[in-house]
Every structure is written in structure tokens, then in C-alpha cells.
């Protein structure tokens, strides 16, 4: 879905340089016209007082029926319902996203029927709805409400339910009489010449709450039918490990295009949070579960803060902060990390979109300045008032234990000797990283004394109680050795879009030095990659928590280790867990080279002609697409998706690529011949690739040298987390 790489360097026809110039023009248009950005609420003369929080316990049966305090109730309501005004953003990108995104179409039963929505999209159907039996007044087949939502939701503030949790419907203020006369619900679904125009006004806007990507089946009380859950079958913040992000957010992507191939390769349950504010690295990551926040805060390390970060309430020049993102980048405290999520899903997009060129990149990013948002966005200030309540709710969330799940105890060994052995293996080999309970100050956790402390502590009945099962420290990827895409992300560097949301400590982390990656084009010549402060992030990963590990496979930060079952039942989760755990400890069982994401078909970069300047529209094919390619079947997706050539490199790169692709096209080369032609361009492609690390399920080899019996005992013990 990231078009930037190809639009700047993958062109098969003489129009290559013309297309690049056209896309530069598009990006400049996207940057805005120079007015001081203000959000819709401020322009309407509203204040945060016009957006009161919901005090009713709307979602009481969720999350195991927790008895919540008033502030915790308001926090959960915000998490599950509040869009922060981002319905403006999602409406905007539906009109002007190169024909890719349209959440309203995604919600229509004709595109994705409610009856297999979880299977197809991984989204959670809201209880109290049914599949559409007829079109609504606008010809849309949206879920029909059969039971009222709990009382207390002001639809003017939170929108109406769509039938899919996390997505709310708002009336579109631009849908006037003229727009209504032009609206055609059937053509909206079926006619790309109609729905792709940026002049089309939709009758609804779709707002997105954090719950859209975090609400998921409750592991301790899974639904009998995932397509028809009850409220008590759902958890608010476990992270939806079943969501298919590409299909959800880009339903207009069509087979035959490179974006289709890129999104089809993305593992379920992952989100590329740098896709819109692009860092030119294709790096979808597992969606964070949220557990034991208070313990996470207790062990948080001191970090230095500077600049706009200090405008956040409660920020200090030095403070203890947990590491939230996989690379520990948004290390400015829970309130700041939480509110950044809302910006990243479209809050105050009137300003956010002026700080970067969405999807394409092309020009340098600028920081999203917190003081500016506080001054010019009512939705920012209303959200800022809510984040403390969200954190209070998070502090109440506890792990889901296999023993508490229906039938779960049957999956836990009754052999005490095996469990005891697993405990000791964990104490000796894992706990120094994967425990928030650590030896006293002055005792090295990896020393003999440190391991002796762990062996004693782990036998205590309360060792797992309130244990975050991570020390929450950052380690260089040279030590962790997992795929480096996320560690090299650049959005949180100084001067980039999330500058105000990362600590000075993060920005000053030393680079790891030269690293070697597997070369899929020549196995005898590893790729030698030298990270640098301009083009790569520092190159670190925080230690992942193992809390409720039995429920969250596949493993690793990118969900690449282990098979995806798509089954949220206890049996389905354990099948995924056992497969991932074996591959974790026996690397020879991993996919390895076969984990490289590759194009499954010959494909092209598709651009709807409506989104290129008029002089180029005449070059489109009969189906309405400007096609750049072909890209041969079997091409490593990240060879192209991670490109960020400087403009000085662009001409030479285009000439070489154009020559290769013209030969493929003109000579009608076989797949093998096309691959050989493409290989000639690889050195230049790799020279401008921000992360030429192609194997997805590599790394974390700790414990792989243990005896087999120790490994099996460890797998059994980790089921109890």
C-alpha cells in the first residue's frame, strides 16, 4: 500500500520521469495552501466542554466483567468509542487516497458480508446487530441494529454504531442537496470511475476509535461463534491479532497491483503505523496487548525529555517512562504515547497532513508540534483531558490465564517435575530479560548470583503475580537479531513527524554498527548494511512481555513466527502457541528464506487516472489505470517497498530500471528470464533501500541451544503465564 517506493523508482515505460514529476506535484498539492490549520471543532467555535465524557458503564460485560471506578469507566468508553474528530480525516482520504481507502465501502455488506466479517477482515461484529436485509435510504447495505446500545452515548459526539466495533458513523455535513442528487449507492460499490473521483461526497463519515484495532475475542471467555460474539466474549485492549489491515483500510486495492501484493503478504494481527506518515519502510507490527500498566510504570527507566514534548501536562526534563512501541520510540510517558495514537489515526489531520506527504513521502517530514495542537485543536485538548482516564482503565487490566479459560486446564501438564524443570530453565535462560521482578540493585541478573536469585524467586507462589514478564529495556538488534524493519524506523528521530513524541534519550541512542543480511539474489554475498542517523532509526527493540503468551501466537514483533490459525477458541490459540513455541526454540523448523514476502503474481503499480494530473490521464489503459511495470512474480516485496532514493539517485535508478523492465515487457521474457533481468538492477535498488533485511522469522535465538527436554519443559511452563 506504500506507493512511494515505486512511484519514485519503478517505471517500465518512457513516461517514468513524467510520472515522477506528476507525483511530486501531487505531493506538493497535499501539503496544503499555507493557512494556519485549525480543526473543525475550533472553527465551529466549540470547546472541550462541548465533548463531555461518558460516565455510564456502557461496556460493563466486557473485559471479564471488571467492576470499574468512575474514571476507569470513562477511560474504557473513550478507548472503545472516541474518534477525536478523525471522521474528517477518513472522509478526506476516501476522496483523495489514490483510490485505495474507503471505510464506508468496507462496512457495506455487499463488499464484506457480516456473516464472515471476522474470518475475512478479522473485525469484531457488534452484538445487537444483524446483516443488512435491505438498503438504507442511500442505497448502502449496512448492518441493521436490532437491540439498542446501552444508554448514555451522545451520537453527535460519538457517532452511531456501524455494527463493527471501533467504527462509528457520522452524518457528512458536506452531503447537501446537490451531493444527494449525484449519489448512487450501486455505482459507489461497483463503478471505479464513480467512486474514485475526489469530487464524490459520501452520505456518512466514518470515525475510528482505538478499539477498532484493539477489541478482540476474550481468551478466557471466547465466543462460540466468532462472527456473533456477546459482550462478555470481548476484551477491549488485548490487541486484535486477527485484523487484516489491508482489506479493512484499503478495500479498493485490486489484484494485479503491487499494493495488493504488499498488503496480501502482511500478517494478520499486524499494523504498519508508519504507513500514512511514511518512513519508507514496510514494517507491519503485532498490535500491542495492554496488561499490568502499573507494573510497567514501576520498572520504567529514567529518560531525558526536550522540546515540544515538555508541553504535555506532567512532563519533566527527566522522568521515568515505559517503552510502548516495539522500538521504544514513543518513550514520553503513557499520556503522550496514548494521544499520539489518536493523531496517527487522524485526529487534527488538518495539521498532521501538513507535516508529511501521506503515503508518498518525497519531501522531508516536519515535527507534529504539541504546543501548536494545544492551541489550534479542540479535539486535541478534549483528548488530552481523557488520557489519564484511559491510563486508569489500563491499570486495571490483568493477564488472561489458560487455567481460567474453558477447558484450558486440560492443556496444562499435571507433571510437577516437568513444570519445575520449566521454571528452572526460565530462571536460568529467560528471566533476566523476561521478568519485571529482578535481583536487588548491584546484582547482575546474568551473573551466577543473579541466576541463583531467579531460581529462588521463581519457586515462590507469587512470582507470576503482577509480573510484566519483561524488564522493558531496549537492546540493539545486533543482540536480538529479529527482522530490523521496525528498529530502523525513522519517524521518531529529531526533526521527523514524531519528534515531539520521543525522548531525547531515544534520539541519542548509539547506532549498532554494520550489520549483515541474507541476500536473496546471491546467497554467497551477504548484504552489508551500515545504519546511519539520517536514513535509519537507532536500531533497538524493547523486550516483549510474555504475559498471556499462550493466547497471542504467532510470535515476534511482526507476527512472523508460527502459523496463523484464525481461531480464537482455546484450542485454536494453543495450536498456534505450540507451533510458534517449537519454531522459537528449534530454529530449523522456521520458514527462514521462505518467510521472505514476495509478489505472488506478475503485477504493476496501479494509479487511478483520477489521481494523476490531467496531461497524464490520457496514458491510462482502458480500465482507467496508469500502469507502471510489469513487476515479475517472485520479486521480494521489500526490495521495492523500502526504497527511499535521494533525488540525485533518481535519474540513474530510473534509467536502469526502465531498461530492465522494457526488456521484460518487449521480449515477453519468461519468469526466470525476467528475474535474471531484474537482478541486474539489484545493486542500485539495494543502495537506496532503507532496510534490506528480507527474512521475517529470524532472530531471538536465546534458548535454542538447550537440551530438547529443557525446551519442552519450558514450553509447558510458559503456558501458565
Image (cartoon, rainbow, N blue to C red):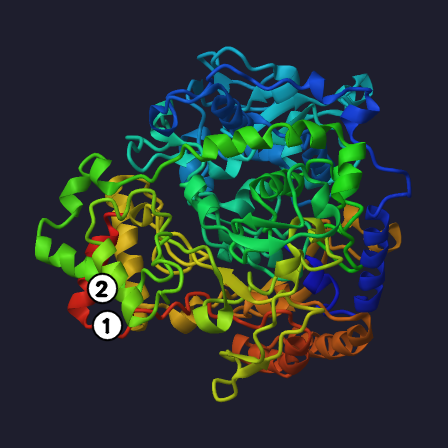
Judging by the rendered image, the residue that carries numbered circle 1 is 706
- 295 or 583, which is in the foreground? 295
What label sits on residue 425 in the rendered view? 2
Q: Is residue 518 positioned above or below 702 on the image?
A: below
- 670 or 185, which is in the foreground? 185
Q: Is residue 197 visible?
A: no
Is the residue under label 1 in contact with that under label 2 (CB below 8 Å)?
yes
What secondary structure is found at the residue carrying circle 2? helix
Image check: 491 left or right of 54? right
At a point 46% along the width and 23% down the height, the residue shown is 131
At a point 23% along the width and 44% down the height, the residue shown is 571
Q: CA distance from mark 2 to mark 1?
A: 9 Å
- 306 or 518, which is in the foreground? 306
Q: Foreground mark, 2 or 1?
A: 2
Tell me the quarter of the picture where residue 343 sits: top right
In x, y percent, where is residue 59? Answer: 44, 21
- 161 or 504, which is in the foreground? 504
Q: Residue furthest right?
A: 34
In x, y percent, where is residue 331? Answer: 58, 51
In x, y percent, where is residue 68? Answer: 42, 22
Amino acid at each position: 500500500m506504500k506507493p512511494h517506493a515505486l512511484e519514485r523508482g519503478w517505471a517500465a515505460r518512457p513516461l517514468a520521469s513524467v510520472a515522477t514529476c506528476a507525483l511530486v506535484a501531487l505531493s506538493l498539492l497535499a501539503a496544503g495552501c499555507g493557512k494556519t490549520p485549525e480543526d473543525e471543532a475550533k472553527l465551529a467555535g466549540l470547546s472541550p466542554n462541548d465533548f463531555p465524557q461518558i460516565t455510564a458503564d456502557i461496556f460493563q460485560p466486557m473485559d471479564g466483567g471488571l467492576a470499574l471506578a468512575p474514571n476507569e469507566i470513562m477511560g474504557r468508553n473513550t478507548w472503545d468509542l472516541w474518534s477525536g474528530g478523525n471522521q474528517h480525516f477518513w472522509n478526506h482520504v476516501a476522496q483523495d487516497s489514490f483510490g485505495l481507502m474507503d471505510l464506508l465501502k468496507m462496512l457495506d455488506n455487499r463488499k464484506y458480508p457480516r456473516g464472515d466479517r471476522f474470518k475475512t477482515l478479522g473485525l469484531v461484529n457488534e452484538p445487537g446487530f444483524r446483516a443488512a436485509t435491505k438498503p438504507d435510504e442511500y442505497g448502502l447495505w449496512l448492518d441493521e441494529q436490532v437491540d439498542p446500545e446501552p444508554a448514555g452515548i451522545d451520537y453527535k459526539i460519538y457517532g452511531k454504531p456501524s455494527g463493527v466495533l471501533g467504527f462509528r458513523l457520522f452524518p457528512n455535513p458536506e452531503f447537501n442537496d446537490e451531493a444527494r442528487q449525484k449519489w448512487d449507492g450501486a455505482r459507489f460499490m461497483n463503478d471505479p470511475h464513480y467512486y474514485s473521483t475526489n469530487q464524490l461526497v459520501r452520505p456518512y463519515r466514518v470515525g475510528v476509535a482505538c478499539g477498532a484495532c484493539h477489541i478482540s475475542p476474550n481468551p478466557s471467555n471466547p465466543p462460540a461463534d466468532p462472527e456473533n460474539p456477546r459482550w462478555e466474549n470481548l476484551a477491549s485492549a488485548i490487541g486484535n491479532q486477527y485484523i487484516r489491515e489491508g482489506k479493512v483500510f484499503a478495500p479498493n486495492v485490486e489484484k494485479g497491483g503491487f499494493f495488493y501484493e504488499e498488503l496480501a503478504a502482511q500478517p494478520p494481527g499486524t499494523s504498519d503505523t508508519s504507513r500514512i506518515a511514511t518512513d519508507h519502510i514496510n514494517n507491519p507490527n503485532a498490535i500491542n496487548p495492554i496488561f499490568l500498566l502499573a507494573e510497567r510504570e514501576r520498572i520504567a527507566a529514567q529518560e531525558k525529555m526536550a522540546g515540544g514534548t515538555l508541553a504535555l501536562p506532567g512532563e519533566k526534563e527527566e522522568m521515568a517512562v515505559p517503552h510502548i512501541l516495539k522500538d521504544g520510540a514513543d518513550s514520553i510517558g503513557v499520556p503522550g504515547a496514548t494521544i499520539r495514537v489518536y493523531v496517527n489515526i487522524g485526529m487534527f489531520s488538518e495539521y498532521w497532513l501538513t507535516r508529511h506527504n501521506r503515503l508518498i513521502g518525497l519531501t522531508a517530514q516536519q515535527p507534529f508540534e504539541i504546543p501548536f495542537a494545544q492551541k489550534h485543536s479542540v479535539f486535541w485538548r478534549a483528548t488530552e483531558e481523557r488520557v489519564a482516564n484511559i491510563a486508569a482503565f489500563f491499570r486495571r487490566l490483568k493477564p488472561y490465564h489458560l487455567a481460567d479459560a474453558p477447558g484450558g486446564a486440560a492443556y496444562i501438564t499435571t507433571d510437577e517435575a516437568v513444570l519445575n524443570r520449566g521454571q528452572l530453565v526460565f530462571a536460568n535462560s529467560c528471566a533476566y530479560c523476561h521478568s519485571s521482578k529482578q535481583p536487588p540493585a548491584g546484582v547482575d541478573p546474568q551473573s551466577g548470583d543473579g541466576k541463583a536469585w531467579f531460581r529462588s524467586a521463581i519457586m515462590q507462589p507469587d512470582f507470576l503475580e503482577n509480573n510484566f514478564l519483561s524488564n522493558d529495556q531496549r537492546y540493539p538488534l545486533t543482540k536480538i537479531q529479529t527482522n530490523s524493519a521496525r528498529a530502523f524506523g525513522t519517524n521518531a528521530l529529531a526533526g521527523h513527524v514524531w519528534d515531539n513524541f520521543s525522548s531525547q534519550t531515544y534520539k541519542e541512542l548509539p547506532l549498532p554498527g554494520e550489520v549483515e543480511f541474507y541476500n536473496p539474489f546471491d546467497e554467497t554475498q551477504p548484504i552489508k548494511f551500515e545504519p546511519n542517523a539520517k536514513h535509519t532509526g537507532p536500531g533497538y527493540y524493547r523486550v516483549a512481555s510474555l504475559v498471556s503468551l499462550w493466547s497471542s501466537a504467532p510470535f515476534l514483533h511482526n507476527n512472523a513466527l508460527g502459523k496463523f490459525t484464525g481461531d480464537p477458541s482455546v484450542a485454536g490459540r494453543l495450536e498456534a502457541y505450540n507451533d510458534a513455541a517449537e519454531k522459537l526454540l528449534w530454529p530449523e523448523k522456521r520458514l527462514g528464506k521462505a518467510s521472505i514476502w514476495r509478489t505472488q503474481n506478475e503485477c504493476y503499480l496501479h494509479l487511478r487516472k483520477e489521481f494523476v494530473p490531467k496531461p497524464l490521464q490520457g496514458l491510462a489503459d482502458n480500465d482507467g489505470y496508469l500502469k507502471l511495470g510489469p513487476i515479475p512474480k517472485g520479486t521480494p516485496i521489500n526490495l521495492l517497498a523500502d526504497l527511499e532514493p535521494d533525488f540525485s539517485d533518481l535519474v540513474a535508478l530510473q534509467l536502469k530500471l526502465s531498461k530492465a523492465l522494457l526488456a521484460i515487457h518487449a521480449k515477453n521474457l519468461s519468469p526466470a528470464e525476467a528475474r535474471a533481468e531484474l537482478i541486474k538492477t539489484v545493486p542500485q535498488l539495494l543502495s537506496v533501500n532503507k532496510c534490506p533485511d528480507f527474512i521475517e522469522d529470524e532472530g531471538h535465538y536465546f534458548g535454542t541451544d538447550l537440551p530438547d527436554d529443557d525446551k519442552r519443559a519450558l514450553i509447558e511452563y510458559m503456558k501458565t503465564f
